[in-house]
Structure formats: C-alpha cells, structure tokens
Image (tube, rainbow, N blue to C red):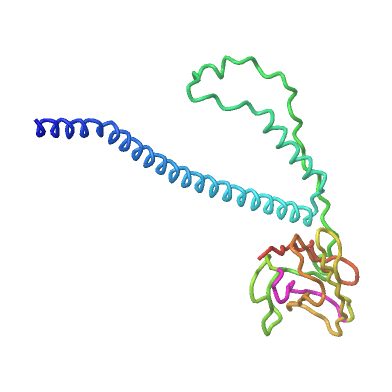
Amino acid sequence: MCSVVAAALTLSACRSSEPQQTVTAVYAEALSSIEMLRVTATVARARIQTTLDYAGTRVAQADAAGAFLASNLISLGTESAYIEQSLQQVEEFNTLAPPNPAANEPAHSVTAQAPHTQAPIAIVTPPALTPPPTSTQRGPRLENISMASGVNEFDCAIDVNPRFTPASTAIYVVGRAFAIPAGATITSSWRRAGTEVVSFSFQREHEINDNCIWFFIDQSDAPFTVGFWSVDISVNGQPVTSPVAFQIVGI
C-alpha cells in the first residue's frame, strides 16, 4: 500500500512539473528572440547612421565643389547674377518635374495625365563676357600661370597645386613672363572671397622675356583661412592675366 501511494505521489509530481517546464522553455526562447532582435536592430541602426554620415559628407563635398566652381567662373569674368539666376532655374525645374510613377502603376497612366499648363521656364542666356584688360601680344604678358607649393632653381613651379591647407608653409603663384620692360612694377594682389587680403610689388631693373617669375605668401603675411582665394598679377597697374583661383581646405 505504501509503495502504491509513493508511486502515485511521484507520478503526480512529474505531471505537475510539465507545464512549468514548458513555460520555462517558452520564456527562454522569447529571451533569445528579444536578444536577436536587439542585436539586429543595433546593426541596422549602425548601418543607417553610416549611410547618413556618408550622405552628409557627399552633400558637403558637393557644396564645396559648387562654391569652388562658382569662384572660378567669377574669376574668369562670369557675372555672379548670371550664376545665381542659373541656380534658381535649376531649382525651379526640379520643383516642376513630375514625380516618377510608382512601381505598381501602369506605364500608360503617365501618358494619360492632363497636359502641363505651367508657363515654360525662360532659358537664361549667358551674358557676353568682357575679357579682363590684357596687354597686346607684343606687350607685357604672363603665360602658363599656376599655383604651386614652391619653385626650382630656374624660378619655375615645382608642381601645379590649386589646393592648400591652413598648415601649408607657403603658397606660390608662378608664370612665364614675356616683354616686361626694365623698370616695370609687377604687383600681385591676393584676395579671399573677392576681398583683398595682401598685395606685393617689386620693380625690375632689367627686362624680363621668356623667364619665370613668382610671388608667394606665407603665414606671416596673412593667415591661411579656409575658403576660396584668387591672386591677380599686373604690370604697371595693368592686369596681364585673369585672376588665378585656388582653395584653402580644412585639414
């Protein structure tokens, strides 16, 4: 009789533990799923953040490239009003452009739309550029002008480098001079965003013909502030070349 009672109690204990074991297993599985979701969400969030950082970097690079292009166009004589008008035209075109049809939308639905009644955008005609005053072919002139990080023993550029940093030692503008008479005053004017920062002049005792000449600035002349710069070269007050654009970029 005692054995039967003990066996019954044992069986009852085993049966009562089955639901508890099931709940424990389900709970452990749920914890595992939650942890997996947490890890997956963390990875996805990191990927999204990386994509956003990359997109932000590319947007900043595009803005810098656009500003540098505008600076070069202005230095070559393009009117800033024309550049602003062209940019506004592009923005208006993007605003008026119809959205792309949805992937599940029939292709013929695009042609079934009512014709667009918006007034056409006026095409901006570039203004006639007035070239900067230059000397005649027989008069003083500079050719092959470039920005460089230094010059060699022949006073010619050791490289062509339109980009510098605030840590650069010096910034050179170098060109090959022709028909510059003895006693002429040669001047370089360095500008940032169109505003003169510093200028230098020197007077030649002898004629210069088919020889390199250069000017430079260093940190003692002006701080190398990040931005868009240009340098003008003139002989006896007359420009002998268009402004030469260069850029100082952040490290």
Residue at image location 9% in from the left, 34% down from the top: 3
Nearest to the observer: residue 234 or residue 75: 75
Magenta run includes residue 180: yes
> How many discs mark residues in the rendered view?
0
- Give me the residue at 78% from left, 57% from top: 75
Whether residue 122 appears in magenta in the rendering, the answer is no
> Above or below — where is 196 with respect to 89?
below
Furthest residue toward front? 1
Question: Is 132 or 247 nearer to us in this picture?
Answer: 247
Q: x%, y% of residue 244?
A: 76, 63
In the displayed structure image, the side of residue 125 where residue 20 appears, left or right = left
Q: In which quarter of the image is the N terminus?
A: top left
The stretch in magenta equals 166-182
Position above or below: 249 against 5 = below
The quarter in which the C terminus is drawn is bottom right
Q: Which residue is drawn at 17% across and 35% down?
A: 10
Q: Position of residue 209 (x, y in %)?
A: 77, 78
Task: Please provide percent x and percent y for residue 239.
Answer: 85, 65
Q: Where is residue 125 in the image (x, y as percent from the top left)?
A: 77, 39
Query: Which one is nearer the viewer's eye here, 15 or 229?
Result: 15
Asked whether, in this view, residue 69 is left or right of residue 112, the answer is right
- Residue 144 visible (yes or no): no
Report which quarter residue 184 is drawn in.
bottom right
* Residue 62 can be seen in this image: yes
Q: In this view, does 181 lie above or below 83?
A: below
The residue at the point 86 percent across, 70 percent down is: 198
- Above or below for 219 versus 55: below
Q: In this view, does 93 lie to the left or right of 138?
A: left
Viewer-side residue, 225 vs 175: 225
